[in-house]
Image (cartoon, rainbow, N blue to C red):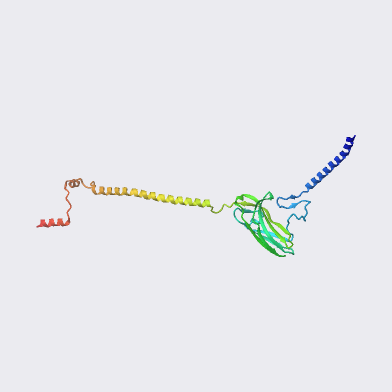
Amino acid sequence: MKLLYLTLLVLPAALLCFQSANILARAEEDELDDVVELDGEDNQVVGDDVSDDDDSVVKSSQDVDTTILFTKPVPNNGDSAFDLQAGFPVEFLVGFINKGSEDYVVETMEASFRYPMDYTYYIQNFTALPYHREVKPQQEATFAYSFIPNEAFAGRPFGLNVQLNYRDASGNYYQEAVYNQTVNIVEVSEGLDGETFFLYVFLGAALVLALVLGQQALASLARRRGPARAAASRVHETGTNNDVDYDWLPKEVVNQLKKSPKTPKQSPRLRKAKRSAGDD
């Protein structure tokens, strides 16, 4: 009987605990349905439970307008997405307009490459340039920034995020994404690189070497043919002096020339002396 009474007392308490646990689980599931989600492209917080007065999120000021102008390279036809050259500087100007009634101080500006499918994932952070420049009400200022994309990123798209950090006179800090778009990193192949330069130098040296070797070969061949031509000319001249062609003369004259002894040549003075002696 005691066990029965104990069971009757514990069973209602266990049922009440089980029901309260189910109620809490359903409440947690309802809260999870309204959880805050992050937009992959705009990096903005959306959801029913997040209000505009949330101090944990750094927002931009309503009294400030910003603009961006790329000077190198220049976008084609004003397109938001354009190509950046790997290894070459990217330069742009950011305009800051103070439309409010209090002073603003521009602290820093930074840029970064993000994963294009999830802008919360950082690929590379560039240097945050400090400005610390005060902008009076109803005035504007321009800030310059530049960075160089790594050559290893060539051929791939990245999300380019440019953020401007500033504060007002009351000490409230603000952050604004001046640029938040996908860009393409391209490789520039124009120009004369080191490999091509050394290839041209090698081809030029090979051409000069070939010309020198050809000139030396021709000079050596000319020296070899020189003595042979001189010997042939001497043989030709000797044969011309000794061999006389008598075919055009009559046979009687030829026979007489062959029979007559050859008289040695005498000088004109000796012939004149013989003639004078004969006259005496």
Given the current orientation, which residue lies at the most extreme top position?
1
In depth, the one of 263 and 30 nearer the eye is: 30
Given the current orientation, which residue lies at the most extreme left position?
280
Give the total of numbered labels.
0
| Quarter of the figure that contains the C terminus | bottom left
In depth, the one of 80 and 11 nearer the eye is: 11
**Horizontal side, residue 238 vs residue 48: left or right:** left
Place of residue 58 in the rendered image (x, y in percent of width and height, measured from the top left): 73, 56
Please give the name of the residue rendered at 62% of the width and 52% of the height, measured from the top-left corner: 185
In depth, the one of 66 and 170 nearer the eye is: 170
Among the 4 quarters of the image, the one containing residue 60: bottom right
Given the current orientation, which residue lies at the most extreme front position?
2
| Quarter of the figure that contains the N terminus | top right
In depth, the one of 152 and 256 nearer the eye is: 152
Place of residue 271 in the rendered image (x, y in percent of width and height, measured from the top left): 15, 55
Place of residue 66 in the rendered image (x, y in percent of width and height, measured from the top left): 70, 59
Place of residue 183 in the rendered image (x, y in percent of width and height, measured from the top left): 65, 52
Please give the name of the residue rendered at 39% of the width and 50% of the height, measured from the top-left corner: 216
**Horizontal side, residue 163 vs residue 230: left or right:** right
